[in-house]
Image: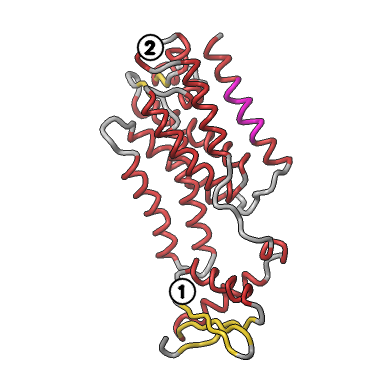
């Protein structure tokens, strides 16, 4: 490494590894070397100021947050939701069956604009067929679990529901009167948007720079293009769900993984909204 600058000297290897994780997250090239005095973390001269600022910010975090040990990359929030989606599919059936519950719960743009707002919620629990359900269950478990590890399971579920419902409402407004939609994918891409918004905020508030912050949004849009733009997909709903999710991710407090009253409250409120929506649909 040319013109190396030592930015941290640690007596314990764990502290050096933490410094290395911080620099890796920022994309700062660095080296960790051991000598008689402990562990030295070095960066190139051009990165010294940014590295020192990032490490100083990390050092000011509460000791419990820094030394609590590794955090699981995913929570079970997405798995729980996937199980509930499967249960809903068993009760309502696929699109081809045209059960009364399916017809009453699908996102009918004209009826939504006439006041049946609950369809924007109930449609998230319906799926066209088994393949549709399986894809949404798998991707939902992945992305919702990731968001849950960042903001907490209850808040993650509430974010998914809000982004999905808002995406369906906006999609109905843009595509009325003859448009019908079902599926949790609008909510899933709302979660992708929230993850992108959260990453944008972290990088913008840190030392990564504006360019890398915008790359976070670009990565989210790349996922949207790769996973949500097939011929069978409702691309408009996916895009709107993503767009709604981005500001949610920007605004949500991060690092709230513990089970708290707020997390439980968000989960219960989400369940209540879905239950009320279905009661209105089936009345």
Q: Please report the bounds of the magenta region as a residue range.
A: 267-275
Q: Between residues 17 and 164, which one lies in front from this camera angle? A: 17
Question: Residue 111: image x %, image y %?
Answer: 43, 16
Instruction: Examine the residues drawn in magenta and state their main secondary structure.
Output: helix
Q: How many marks?
A: 2
| Residue 94 location, quadrant | top left
- The residue that label 2 is drawn on is 97
Residue farthest to the left, as pictured = 231
Left or right of residue 232, residue 260 in this image: right
The numbered mark, 2 or 1, whose residue comes first in the sequence reads 1
Secondary element type, mark 2: helix
Does residue 114 lie above or below 186 as drawn? above
Residue drawn at x 53%, y 34% as measured from the top left: 162
Q: Do the residues labelled 2 and 1 touch (CB within 8 Å)?
A: no
Residue drawn at x 65%, y 50% as measured from the top left: 256
Q: Is residue 219 magenta?
A: no
Secondary element type, mark 1: loop
Mark sitting on residue 28? 1
Residue drawn at x 63%, y 54% as measured from the top left: 255
Residue drawn at x 60%, y 25% as measured from the top left: 273
Does residue 46 lie above or below 195 as drawn? below
Question: Residue 86: image x %, image y %?
Answer: 49, 25
Q: Between residues 224 and 4, which one lies in front from this camera angle? A: 4
Q: How crowded is mark 1: few (under 14 residues within 10 Å), some or many (20 or more)?
A: some
Q: Between residues 95 and 131, which one lies in front from this camera angle? A: 131
């Amino acid at each position: 490494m040319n013109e190396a600058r030592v930015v941290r000297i640690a007596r314990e290897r764990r502290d050096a590894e933490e410094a290395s994780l911080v620099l890796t997250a920022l994309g700062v090239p660095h080296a960790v070397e051991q000598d008689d005095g402990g562990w030295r973390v070095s960066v190139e001269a051009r990165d010294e100021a940014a590295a020192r600022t990032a490490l100083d910010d990390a050092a000011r975090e509460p000791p419990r947050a820094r030394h609590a040990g590794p955090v699981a990359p995913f929570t079970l929030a997405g798995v729980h939701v996937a199980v509930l989606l499967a249960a809903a599919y068993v009760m309502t059936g696929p699109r081809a069956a045209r059960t009364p519950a399916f017809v009453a719960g699908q996102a009918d743009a004209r009826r939504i604009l006439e006041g049946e707002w609950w369809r924007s919620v109930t449609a998230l629990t319906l799926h066209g067929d088994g393949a549709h359900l399986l894809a949404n269950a798998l991707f939902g478990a992945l992305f919702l679990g990731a968001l849950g590890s960042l903001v907490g399971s209850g808040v993650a579920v509430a974010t998914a529901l809000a982004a999905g419902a808002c995406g369906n409402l906006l999609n109905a407004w843009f595509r009325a009167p003859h448009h019908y939609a079902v599926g949790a994918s609008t909510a899933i891409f709302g979660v992708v948007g929230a993850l992108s918004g959260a990453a944008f905020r972290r990088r913008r508030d840190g030392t990564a720079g504006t360019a890398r912050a915008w790359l976070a949004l670009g990565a989210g849009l790349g996922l949207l293009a790769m996973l949500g733009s097939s011929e069978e997909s409702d691309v408009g709903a996916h895009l709107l769900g993503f767009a709604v999710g981005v500001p949610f991710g920007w605004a949500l407090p991060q690092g709230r993984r513990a089970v708290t009253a707020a997390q439980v409250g968000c989960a219960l409120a989400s369940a209540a909204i879905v239950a009320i929506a279905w009661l209105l649909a089936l009345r």
